Image (spheres, rainbow, N blue to C red):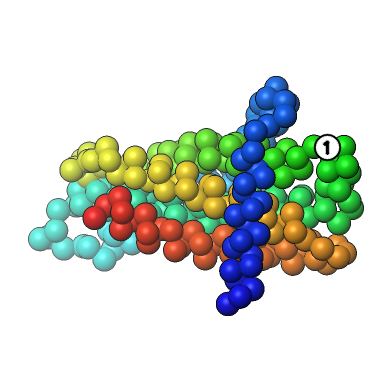
Amino acid sequence: MLKLFEQIGRYVLLMGKVFSKPEKLGIYRRRILFEMDALGMNSIGLTAIISIFIGAVITLQMSINLESPFIPQYLIGYATRETMILEFSSTVVALILAGKVGSTIASEIGTMRITEQIDALEIMGINSASYLILPKVVATVFFFPFLTILSILIGVIGGYMISVFTGIMIPDDYVEGLFYCFRTYSIIYSLIKMAFFAFIITSISAFCGYYAAGNSLEVGKASTRAVVISSIVIMLFNLILTQILLI
């Protein structure tokens, strides 16, 4: 328990260094754009592929399990939309990104730590925590919500495609369900969650990599630790944010 509080304290102190005043804003702007491309744009393909299949599977399962003359078919489209918006495109996509982006950040910063590149930055008088971590945090917090929107759109398209190609339900009924009882706040809720999850993924992964010590094996352990801890914290905050924002 004491070790847990020690790690939380080190994390808080690191975040204090990360969000201290940057030395040169121009450098940070360029690094933020670079990180948006490296961490955000490179995640579009994975997000799109998973989302289209999940949207199709949700629609297929709903059609099979709700096959009844007493249940309107448009509710299948409604259920697919709500599942994608409320949970999959924020929470599940965040868990996937924790594995892809989180491990990348932890291994990158961890390698810099064990090869003493971070020590070299400190000797030159550069705030290494802010220089290395802040652009990543800003890039993911701003870009990951766009991945959520993309996931929602592609997911519902996947559901429509499976209804057209398999004939398991009438496509027009599916489209009707997409607009049934639509609430804009559900989108806002999903985007807020993803922004929180982006910060969690980036900051925890950077923390694990920043304090890596030893040899290259420790970088691998730090990467694994980053994914596991980020996933646990994401699920915890998913519960907290749902309680705060929806109830």
Image height check: is 242 above or below 35?
below
- Is the C terminus in the top left, top right, bottom left or bottom right quadrant? bottom left
- Is the N terminus in the top left, top right, bottom left or bottom right quadrant? bottom right
Seen at 87% across and 37% down, the residue is: 124
Image height check: is 103 above or below 190?
below
Q: Nearer the viewer, residue 67 or 235?
A: 235
Seen at 44% across and 55% down, the residue is: 91
Q: Nearer the viewer, residue 179 or 219?
A: 219
Q: Is residue 115 left or right of residue 131?
A: right
Q: In the rendered image, which residue does mark 1 sit on?
A: 125
Seen at 38% across and 46% down, the residue is: 190
Q: Is residue 121 visible?
A: yes
The residue furthest bottom is 1
Image height check: is 68 above or below 100?
below
The residue furthest left is 70
Q: Position of residue 133 (x, y in %)?
A: 68, 43
Q: Position of residue 93 (x, y in %)?
A: 49, 52
Q: Is residue 214 left or right of residue 84?
A: right
Count residues near mark 1 (Cα–Cα under 10 Å), then give few for <14, some for 14-19, many for 20+: few
Seen at 61% across and 61% down, the residue is: 9
Query: Tag 1, which secondary structure?
Result: loop
Q: Is residue 102 visible?
A: no
Q: Nearer the viewer, residue 228 or 13?
A: 13
Q: Position of residue 158 (x, y in %)?
A: 41, 46
Q: Position of residue 246 (x, y in %)?
A: 27, 52
- Amino acid carrying label 1: it is Gly
Q: Is residue 15 left or right of residue 221?
A: left
